[in-house]
């Protein structure tokens, strides 16, 4: 795969198109934009490429992709990644698009929650039904500890080195990080409400082996309280079948699954209709010039929430985006079947 997964950086990155969302519609946008010589950077708050297809139904069959009788969400993602290889898109994963502002030269500046700054004349919102955001710990004082000693994702492993760690959850994320962090932690406790896990059997077996060896602990119960000063945790109270007990903890990772929210996009001044972004059907431009929306997140009369509809929207949108990126260049429509120039771009011999 020639796609580049970028590390978080505060140095401004200049490109032609910022795509918010790395699902099927965002990926196909890379292809259509690439045919028109537009370079793309994609931002997604998931830690993997593929959007809802990869996160919600990677093994579930899809039957309405043209010319493909059946494929899984992951197979579709893999095929789209193969298709965009010639254009070498850059991905900024595990980052949420947070702030959008227009610079004096008319270029948009996007800043993510990790501090990455990307600048481009065109922004495309292809965020599906919204952003996947973590389900937060439902305790009144939890927010005071967030991003200092309470986390919902691992951005830097060294932040957990030589710390007393507790991980809450019973899915793949909880088990994977328990196994990855255990070797560098001072101590590690895995907490789940029941002694039954939704993670890969091999991960569960490895975890139980570590517990049996005394290399980590497993507690059955639920978090009922947090202790500490300022934003630093010192202990977590667990409620189990035998009552409550407080465990010394310096770092808490809570993996309670994901939910869908429009997130910071709702504050960008776009014309919204029931948490969807209204667009025209000629360019799929929003109420703000230079910002486009395609896929499930956009709405217009007759809209169908289908992947194939998003592909159509991406193709038309890129024609309009080209005029913004290259106002002095004439746009000549060409077919991939017959254009030798497009064949060179695609590596066709």
Image (cartoon, rainbow, N blue to C red):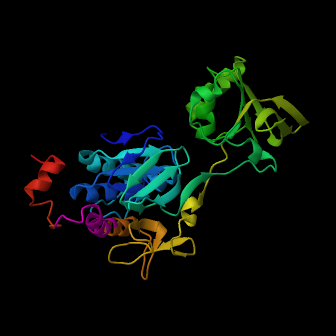
Residue farthest toward the top in the current orientation of the protein: 213
Q: Could you tell me residue 44's position as x and y percent?
A: 48, 50
The span picked out in magenta is 314-330
- Give the x, y percent position of residue 283: 33, 73
Image height of 345 relative to 130, above or below: above
Residue 26 shown left or right of residue 315 in the figure = right
**Magenta includes 228?**
no
Nearer to the camera, 175 or 324: 324
Chief SS of the magenta region: helix
Residue name at image x 43 percent, y 77 percent: 303
Q: Is residue 168 visible?
A: no
290 left or right of 135 in image = left
Residue at the extreme right:
243
Q: Is residue 206 above or below residue 298?
A: above
The reply to whether residue 308 is visible in this rendering is yes
Identity of the residue drawn at 62% across and 20% down: 184
Give the answer, above or below, for where 21 lies relative to 256. below
């Amino acid at each position: 795969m020639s796609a580049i997964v970028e590390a978080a950086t505060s140095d401004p990155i200049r490109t032609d198109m910022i795509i918010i969302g790395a699902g099927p519609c965002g990926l196909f946008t890379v292809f259509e934009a690439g045919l028109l010589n537009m370079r793309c950077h994609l931002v997604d708050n998931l830690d993997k490429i593929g959007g809802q297809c990869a996160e919600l139904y990677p093994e579930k069959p899809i039957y309405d992709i043209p010319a493909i009788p059946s494929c899984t969400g992951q197979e579709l993602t893999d095929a789209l990644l193969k298709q965009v290889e010639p254009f070498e898109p850059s991905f900024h994963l595990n980052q949420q698009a947070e702030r959008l502002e227009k610079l004096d030269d008319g270029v948009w500046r996007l800043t993510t929650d990790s501090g990455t700054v990307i600048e481009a004349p065109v922004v495309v919102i292809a965020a599906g039904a919204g952003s996947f955001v973590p389900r937060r710990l439902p305790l009144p004082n939890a927010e005071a500890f967030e991003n200092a000693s309470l986390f919902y994702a691992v951005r830097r492993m060294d932040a957990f080195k030589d710390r007393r760690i507790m991980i809450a959850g019973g899915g793949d994320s909880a088990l994977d990080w328990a196994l990855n962090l255990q070797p560098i932690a001072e101590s590690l406790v895995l907490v789940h409400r029941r002694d039954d896990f939704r993670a890969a059997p091999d991960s569960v077996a490895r975890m139980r082996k570590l517990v049996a060896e005394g290399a980590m602990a497993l507690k059955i119960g639920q978090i009922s309280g947090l202790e500490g000063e300022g934003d630093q945790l010192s202990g977590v109270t667990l409620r189990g079948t035998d009552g409550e007990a407080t465990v010394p903890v310096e770092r808490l990772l809570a993996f309670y699954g994901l939910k869908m929210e429009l997130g910071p996009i709702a504050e960008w001044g776009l014309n919204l209709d029931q948490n969807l972004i209204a667009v025209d059907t000629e360019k799929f431009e929003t109420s703000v010039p230079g910002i486009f929306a395609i896929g499930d997140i956009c709405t217009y009369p007759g809209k169908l929430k289908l992947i194939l509809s998003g592909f159509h929207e991406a193709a038309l949108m890129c024609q309009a985006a080209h005029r913004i990126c290259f106002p002095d260049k004439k746009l000549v429509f060409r077919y991939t079947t017959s254009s030798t120039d497009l064949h060179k771009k695609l590596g066709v011999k």
